[in-house]
Image: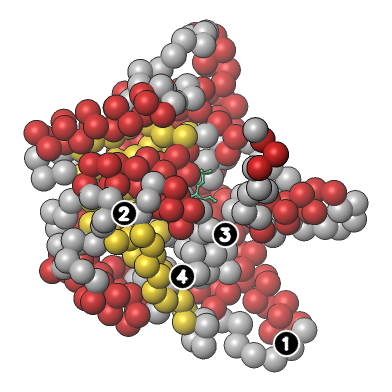
């Protein structure tokens, strides 16, 4: 039966990670995956998470199932760091990747399998496979202009204007992977206006909130859409800003016109989660909920996140200065300090 199975499509990131792990050089630096590393080039657990683990150990909640749709306290807190408003259908997901998958599945099953999904390239390598998996068609446009080494606003606006009415558009809300090039607030405003005219459906992916310019600044595009009363989906990962990568903690928020639509959307998401995985992992969301609900741990989290963000900006500056003032490398390297987040 299994002899006919062919090998899967190679994943460059998977292969690069395996090669990096097996490289014995003591001075190796893994620049592949979107993970924050400390001065020693190692993973670093947040102090606030360490504290929440101790609190959780004392309460000892055991390992019962979560509700199909996730931990309600976590979802309330998690949606609060993205935007504060009602009309929301929020469910827990297997981190940001699971949120993107669930969003795609929901669009394909509950909106239309024929909806065209526009993605600016280059981009995170998982969008197209996630859309393919649920039978949605991906259409690419240029997110980045290599000649100016910056975000390509004209191409984005043109793609939105020329797309068939009611298309879907995936946007990374901040810290674009892999270019680090994000639209400015003014450009977001034009994007949102154009989306509204075309009656398009925005799908935001916020995987690096807090690592660009600040928690609120990085959620600018998402909150702008909410303020302008667009209906949209927002995928949220807590992997990076809580350093909870392996706990697979995330959520999908669907912002609806009214509470009746939100209730129905929530009910459809409940079905999709139930049929696919029954419920989501409990531990990471319990930790995030504890940190966000506790005044002291919440303040510590914001301080630790600011320290990570400031260090990333300082590393960019150091790299820029090495290339220009110390090595006199030909060319213009200013994009390195203009970009945000982990990527360049
Ligand atoms: N979206 C983007 C743009 C990413 O870069 C990543 C991870 O690297 C994710 C989503 C998903 O991350 P996770 O599934 O760990 O939350």
Nearer the N terminus, badge 3 or badge 4? 4
Residue 162 pos. (x, y %): 23, 77
Real-space Cα distance between discs 2 and 4? 15 Å
Q: What residue did someone put label 1 on?
A: 329
What element does badge 4 sit on?
strand
Query: Which is more N-terminal, label 1 or label 2?
Result: 2
Q: Which residue is mark 4?
A: 121
Labels 2 and 4 touching (C-beta < 8 A): no
In this picture the colour scheme is secondary structure
Q: Considering only vertical position in the picture, is 281 above or below 197?
A: above
Mark 4–mark 1 Cα distance, whole angstroms, equals 27 Å
Name the residue tied to disc 3.
342
Residue 277 position, x and y percent, is 44, 26
Residue density around tag 2, few if under 14, some if 14–19, many if 20 or more, within 10 Å: many
Q: Residue at x 65, y 33 (%)?
A: 1
| Discs 2, 3 touching: Cβ within 8 Å | no
Q: Residue 259 vs residue 14: left or right?
A: left
Residue 30 seen in the current view: yes
Q: Residue at x 48, y 53 (%)?
A: 129
How far is mark 2 from mark 3, CA to CA? 21 Å
Mark 3 and mark 1 lie on one chain; the one further toward the N terminus is: 1
């Amino acid at each position: 039966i299994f002899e006919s199975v062919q090998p899967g499509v190679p994943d460059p990131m998977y292969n690069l990670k395996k090669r990096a792990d097996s490289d014995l050089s003591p001075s190796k630096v893994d620049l592949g995956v979107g993970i924050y590393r400390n001065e020693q080039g190692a993973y670093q657990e947040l102090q606030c998470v360490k504290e929440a683990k101790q609190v959780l150990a004392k309460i000892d909640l055991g390992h019962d199932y979560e509700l199909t749709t996730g931990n309600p306290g976590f979802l309330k807190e998690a949606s609060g760091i993205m935007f504060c408003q009602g009309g929301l259908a929020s469910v827990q997901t297997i981190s940001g990747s699971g949120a993107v998958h669930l969003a795609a599945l929901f669009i394909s099953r509950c909106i239309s399998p024929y909806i065209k999904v526009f993605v600016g390239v280059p981009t995170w390598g998982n969008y197209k496979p996630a859309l393919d998996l649920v039978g949605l068609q991906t259409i690419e446009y240029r997110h980045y202009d290599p000649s100016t080494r910056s975000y390509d606003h004209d191409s984005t606006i043109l793609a939105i204007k020329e797309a068939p009415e009611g298309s879907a558009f995936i946007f990374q809300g901040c810290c674009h992977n892999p270019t680090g090039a994000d639209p400015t607030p003014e450009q977001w405003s034009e994007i949102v206006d154009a989306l509204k005219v075309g009656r398009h459906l925005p799908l935001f992916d916020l995987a690096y909130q807090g690592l660009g310019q600040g928690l609120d600044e990085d959620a600018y595009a998402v909150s702008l859409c909410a303020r302008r009363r667009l209906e949209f989906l927002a995928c949220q990962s807590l992997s990076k800003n809580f350093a909870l990568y392996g706990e697979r903690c995330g959520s999908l928020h669907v912002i609806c016109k009214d509470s009746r639509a939100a209730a129905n959307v929530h009910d459809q998401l409940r079905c999709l989660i139930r049929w696919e995985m029954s419920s989501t992992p409990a531990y990471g969301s319990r930790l995030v909920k504890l940190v966000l609900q506790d005044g002291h741990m919440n303040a510590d989290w914001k301080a630790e996140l600011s320290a990570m963000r400031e260090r990333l900006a300082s590393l960019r500056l150091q790299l820029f200065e090495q290339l220009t003032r110390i090595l006199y490398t030909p060319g213009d390297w200013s994009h390195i300090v203009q970009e945000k987040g982990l990527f360049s």
